[in-house]
Each structure stands twice: as structure tokens, then as C-alpha cells.
């Protein structure tokens, strides 16, 4: 089988938009694996989720995948989680007959998946989006921050090159440079949330809708925007198939 690959230098969602300018013939988009989680409310900042949303807007089923480990700097760090995602995608694509008819149930949504930092994992958990958030701690880069903060960034990233802060001496006069030094994280550890599932050692599966408005009438509550029974059924079935192939468990799912 011959595969076409392209290398793009751009944020995630513009890369996805460019892909759709080249072709519309996609069965499924998998965005990731991102180094670092995309849990709770900070999915709104996520390029990984944004790229999957761009595909979903175009009507293509999409999965966003993130690893809760910023220190994963080699392929080995992603290997265990990748095996879970491959099993899940294979289950989605092989369940049913014909040209993946069940994938049509995944349109107008993004399946946000997050992998724990360390394996072995318990299995797959169908989790709701939590309210956890990362405080974006942007600070102006000065000579002092270069000296004082690189130690902090090295501890966070585990790699000297990744930790390097732009040197203010290399900047043009009058240009102010800011960098996110990553502030405090507030985890939502309510049972069943995505953060809770990942911290408990589960690979979390969280369907996200494309719309964010609040339902305020009975008519809207009956719309396709608010109810996705076929999507949940498809995701749940794929989780069970993937878990069986890996010899692991499934949690959080309704009865089929």
C-alpha cells in the first residue's frame, strides 16, 4: 500500500484546513498524539482538538489523542498509548459491513481521548468533560527570566532544548516577548470526569459536540445537537471490541 505524507510547519488546525484544500476523500481523521493532556476546560486552547474539530466541521469523523506526559520525548514514551488508539480505531473501522457505515455516526462531534502518563492502563473509560483547567502563566522574557526560569522549564519538560527560553538579547529593539511558563493546574477529580479517569489509570474517551450553546427549550432538547444516541452506541461498542482485543476493561459505559 502506498501512502502520501506531507510535512507542514504551522499550528494544528491550519494544517488540517490545508489538507482539506488538497483532498476531501478522508474516512477518518486522527489528530495527535499530542505530548501533554487535553482534559477538562482547556480543550478550548488545544490545537490537537482544534484540528479534529476542523475535520468534524467538514463532516469527517475525527478523534483527538493526547498523552498526559510532557516528558515523553521518544517514540517509546508513546508506544503503549498508541497501541490502545490503534485498537480503538480498528474497532471503529471494522464494526459493521461495507465502507465503515458506523463512522457516519461520529459526524458533528470529536472523540477526545487522553492517555495516562504511565502504563499499564486499566482499559478504556467513557468519561464526561470535566471542569479542570491549566492556568496560562505568560511572562515577559527578560535576561532575568532566562536565568531564573530555565531551571523550572527543564524540570517540567525534561529536555534542555525544549526548556530553552528565547534570549532577550537576540530580539530587535522595542519587541517584547512573552512565554507561557505553565501555571497551576486545577484538576476536576469528580468521579467519571476525564481528569479523574486519566489520573486513575484509564484511557479516557470523551465525545465533544461542535456547538457550545446552552439548550433553553424543549424543542432544542430534542434536536440532533443535544442527543447523540447512535454516536454513544458506536463509541461504546468500539471500546468493548478494542478492550477485548487488548485484554483490558471498559468503564463508564451505558448498557448496550
Image: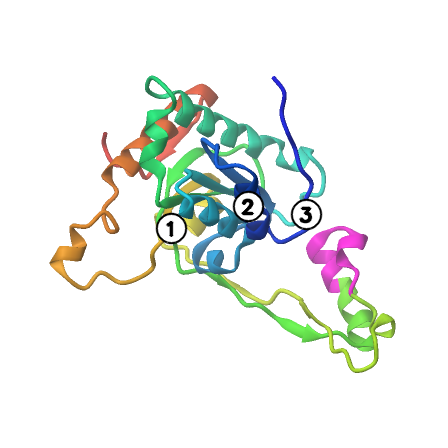
> Badge 2 is on which residue?
16
Question: Is 89 rendered above or below residue 252?
Answer: above
Q: Residue furthest bottom?
A: 174
Task: Give the side of residue 215 with respect to residue 4, left or right.
Answer: left
For the residues labelled 2 and 3, say whether their Cβ atoms are less than 8 Å apart: no
In terms of depth relative to the viewer, which is nearer, 32 or 21?
21
Q: Which residues are magenta?
A: 152-165
Task: Tell us which disc is closer to us: 2 or 3.
Answer: 2
Mark 2 crowdedness (10 Å alpha carbons): few <14, some 14-19, many ≥20: many
Q: Position of residue 227 (x, y in %)?
A: 23, 46
What numbered label is drawn on residue 193? 1
> Badge 3 is on which residue?
71
Q: Quadrant of residue 95?
A: top left
Residue located 86% across and 70% down the image = 170
Q: Secondary structure at mark 2?
A: helix
Q: Residue furthest right?
A: 169
Mark 1 crowdedness (10 Å alpha carbons): few <14, some 14-19, many ≥20: many
In terms of depth relative to the viewer, which is nearer, 191 or 217?
217
Q: Quadrant of residue 6?
A: top right
Q: Position of residue 106 (x, y in %)?
A: 35, 37
Amino acid at each position: 500500500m502506498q501512502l502520501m505524507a506531507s510535512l507542514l510547519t504551522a499550528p494544528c488546525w491550519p494544517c488540517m484546513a490545508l489538507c482539506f484544500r488538497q483532498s476531501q476523500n478522508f474516512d477518518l481523521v486522527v489528530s495527535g498524539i499530542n505530548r501533554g493532556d487535553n482534559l477538562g476546560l482547556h480543550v478550548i486552547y488545544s490545537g490537537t482538538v482544534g484540528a479534529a474539530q476542523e475535520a468534524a466541521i467538514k463532516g469527517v469523523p475525527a478523534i483527538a489523542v493526547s498523552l498526559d506526559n510532557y516528558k515523553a520525548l521518544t517514540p517509546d514514551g508513546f508506544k503503549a498509548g498508541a497501541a490502545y488508539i490503534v485498537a480503538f480505531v480498528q474497532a471503529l473501522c471494522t464494526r459493521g459491513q461495507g465502507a465503515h457505515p458506523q463512522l457516519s455516526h461520529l459526524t458533528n462531534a470529536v472523540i477526545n481521548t487522553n492517555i495516562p502518563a504511565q502504563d499499564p492502563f486499566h482499559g478504556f473509560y467513557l468519561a464526561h468533560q470535566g471542569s479542570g483547567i491549566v492556568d496560562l502563566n505568560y511572562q515577559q522574557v527578560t535576561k532575568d527570566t532566562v536565568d531564573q526560569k530555565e531551571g523550572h522549564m527543564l524540570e517540567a519538560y525534561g529536555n534542555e532544548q525544549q526548556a530553552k527560553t528565547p534570549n532577550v538579547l537576540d530580539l530587535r529593539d522595542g519587541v517584547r516577548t512573552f512565554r507561557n511558563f505553565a501555571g497551576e493546574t486545577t484538576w476536576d477529580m469528580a468521579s467519571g470526569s476525564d481528569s479523574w479517569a486519566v489520573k486513575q489509570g484509564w484511557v479516557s474517551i470523551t465525545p465533544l459536540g461542535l456547538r457550545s450553546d446552552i439548550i433553553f427549550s424543549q424543542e432544542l432538547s430534542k434536536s440532533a445537537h443535544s442527543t447523540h444516541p447512535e454516536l454513544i452506541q458506536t463509541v461504546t461498542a468500539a471500546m468493548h471490541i478494542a478492550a477485548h482485543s487488548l485484554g483490558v476493561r471498559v468503564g463508564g459505559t451505558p448498557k448496550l
